[in-house]
Image (cartoon, rainbow, N blue to C red):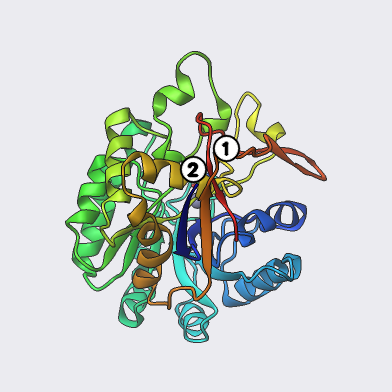
Amino acid sequence: MKQLSICRPDDWHLHLRDGKMLAAVIDDTSRHFGRAIIMPNLIPPVVTGADAAAYRDRILSCLNPEHHFTPLMTLYLTETTQLHDVADAAKRGLVHAVKLYPAGATTNSASGVRDLEKVMPVLEMMASIGLPLCVHGEVTDPKVDIFDRELVFIETVLDPLRRRIPELRVVLEHVTTSDGVDYVKNGGKTIAATITTHHLFINRNHILAGGIRPHYYCLPVAKRESHRRALVRAAVSGDQSFFLGTDSAPHLDTAKLMACGCAGIYTSPNTMSCLAHIFEGESALDRLEGFTSLHGPAFYQLPINKERVTLVKQSEPVIYPKSRATPDGELTIFDCGFPLFWAVKS
Ligand code: DOR
Ligand code: ZN
């Protein structure tokens, strides 16, 4: 039996939703993770410091008292976001990042940013206080092919923005391309990227070949195999610029399995087993802790978690349920396509 003890992991990109869904999914994160950066794309979005404080309280009220979990709140950047409100929420330690959704890029992004000019003063203030900007890095121009949207975003939005405000600290969320990996690798200390669990396993064939698989549909959409390999290499490389952000994004099966299904994959329950499988396959188990537990706090300038967790490799596969029941219906859990032998023991 193999064992691995690591510092308790954090999830630097997580959707917890609200209400009944929040109550149904929170345990799957708080059981294993110490902290998570909580995405603000609720309806209505979490825009102000007051919104974030109220949302944080709703999350805390659902927490299992035996779990030691801290939600790290973010604000949803809009063209009318108030600079002083963001600065105040950051100063109070309530908010740890601001999220940029290009309007229309993904789930609940309609209130996002159309014209970056309008948010420049907020971004300049964030640069001056070191508050990170998390970006959904895809252009929304319908003329741009969906598989090219990340690269075009980097070239036409992200790089010009970083040249204009070089001190702005940016997280390129859920990077999906070798181009994105290279950009971050060579981008210096002000940029990092999160990598999701699912993008380490699936390429676009998994979504489309041999039948359409709505449970593998997410945004940014998985790319071809060479890009998946680049993500795996980045994750296991030990480069501090890359860390875990699951983008675990629960949607009810009824919302996924329809003519126009929602984007999002629910990976919180089995993420640590999945990651240990990938890192072991790359002979890089010694780098798992960096990816899940050390690089993220370093970028966010937070201490690492004091607690530790133990991963144990079992002789029999760990059995995860296919779905979670919620009061409104089933929620399918990510099926990585392989038997998983690594279990989280504490
Ligand atoms: O697949 C996704 N789901 N990508 C996103 O950017 C948003 C997320 C969600 O909120 O469902
Ligand atoms: Zn997300």
Total labels drawn:
2
Q: Secondary structure at mark 1?
A: loop
Q: Quadrant of the C terminus?
A: bottom right
The residue at the point 34 percent across, 55 percent down is 286
Describe residue 243's horizontal placement relative to residue 48 as left or right: left
Rendered position, 189 above or below 325 = below
| Amino acid identity at mark 2 | Cys
Residue 98 seen in render:
yes
The residue at the point 19 percent across, 64 percent down is 188
Q: Position of residue 68 (x, y in %)?
A: 63, 71
| Amino acid identity at mark 1 | Phe
Residue, far front: 1
Q: Position of residue 130 (x, y in %)?
A: 34, 78
Q: Residue tagged by mark 1?
A: 334
Residues 193 and 302: in front is 302
Describe residue 324's horizontal placement relative to residue 31 as left or right: right
Q: Position of residue 254 (x, y in %)?
A: 71, 32
The residue at the point 35 percent across, 72 percent down is 298
Q: Position of residue 86 (x, y in %)?
A: 48, 77
Disc 2 C-beta below 8 A from ligand 1: no
Q: Residue tagged by mark 2?
A: 274
The residue at the point 55 percent across, 79 percent down is 94
- Label 1–label 2 contact, CB within 8 A: yes
Residue 105 seen in render:
no
